[in-house]
Image: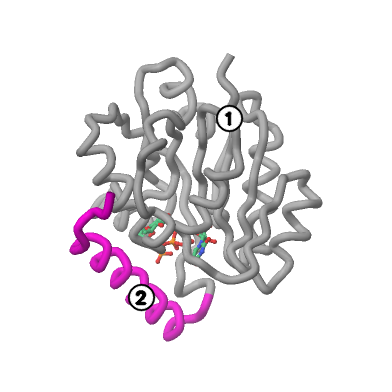
Amino acid sequence: MNETVAIIPAYNEESTIGNVLSVLNNSRVIDQTVVVSDGSTDNTVQVSREFGANVIELEENVGKGGAMKAGLDNITADIILFLDADLIGLTSIHIEALLLPVINNEADMTVGIFEKGRIATDFAQKVAPYLSGQRAVAKKVLTDISDINMSRFGVEVALNRHIEENNIRVKEVILQDVSHVMKEEKFGVLRGFAARMKMYWEIVKYFAKKEVK
Ligand SMILES: O=c1ccn([C@@H]2O[C@H](COP(=O)(O)OP(=O)(O)O)[C@@H](O)[C@H]2O)c(=O)[nH]1
Ligand SMILES: O=C(O)[C@@H](COP(=O)(O)O)O[C@H]1O[C@H](CO)[C@@H](O)[C@H](O)[C@H]1O
């Protein structure tokens, strides 16, 4: 039997992570949930523990890729579900849609694409579906992935490069009615826009970087 674990990188997500964790707690295909608090200064850790998640507390903010790697280094399960902590509209149907193709060995990785969630987040994923943070993956295909811990928001580019170079079987899964909280909503228009630009910079920087093996 495959063992499954959900890994959630989380940086100051106290207001949304509880919803994601309660869906995971009610899912029949998730055996365990690990939240990696990436130097959070709010109550992300306490809320996650209240919902029964195993929590890895990073003292400093290392970025999304580093948080995901910290999760990967601390699990034994053979199938991983990566989810963002700020999802809106997630249900156990979405969790199964992401995981079952990997559990049934029809794909090595699934990538979840928002549809009919909200116009802005649908549009972002239409333009760049492969930036999605919602993915199930067989751990065996990630054993030799390099430097995702240094990639911050470039982590999805690192995963995509790994997919291409290793002929990994990928399936897109539509996540109907799912959205996430946008940076402008989290931080306000100006700080949100600045955070968005920083994220794009981290993505472009990783994109331009040659892979270090
Ligand atoms: O330095 C960071 C930035 C983000 N995240 C987490 O990575 C996921 C995706 O980040 P965010 O929601 O900011 O990205 P968006 O989906 O808005 O682009 C979320 O669970 C964040 O809490 C993290 O662990 N460390
Ligand atoms: O959809 C996108 O363009 C970005 C932007 O999200 P925001 O609307 O700025 O919160 O979010 C995605 O990209 C990040 C970088 O690849 C991923 O880490 C996130 O999981 C993903 O939601």
Image quadrant where residue 196 sits: bottom left
Q: Left or right: where does residue 182 sit relative to residue 171?
A: right
Local secondary structure at mark 2: helix
Q: Which residue is mark 2?
A: 198
- Magenta stretch: helix, strand or loop mostly: helix
Q: Is residue 15 magenta?
A: no
| Label 2: how many Cα within 10 Å (few below 14, some 14–19, many 20+) | few
Q: x, y percentage for residue 112?
A: 39, 40
Where is residue 18 drawn, in percent x and y? Answer: 69, 52
What amino acid is labelled 2 in the image? Lys
Q: Is residue 201 magenta?
A: yes
Q: Nearer the viewer, residue 188 or 4?
A: 4
Indicate which disc residue 77 carries.
1
Magenta residue span: 187-213
* Residue type highlighted by circle 1: Ala
Residue 104: x and y in percent read 44, 15
The one of 122 and 151 positioned closer to us in this rendering: 151
Q: Quadrant of residue 176?
A: top left
Which quarter of the frame holds ligand 2?
bottom left
Q: How many marks?
A: 2
CA gap, disc 2 and disc 1: 33 Å
What residue is at 28 percent from the left and 27 percent from the top? 169
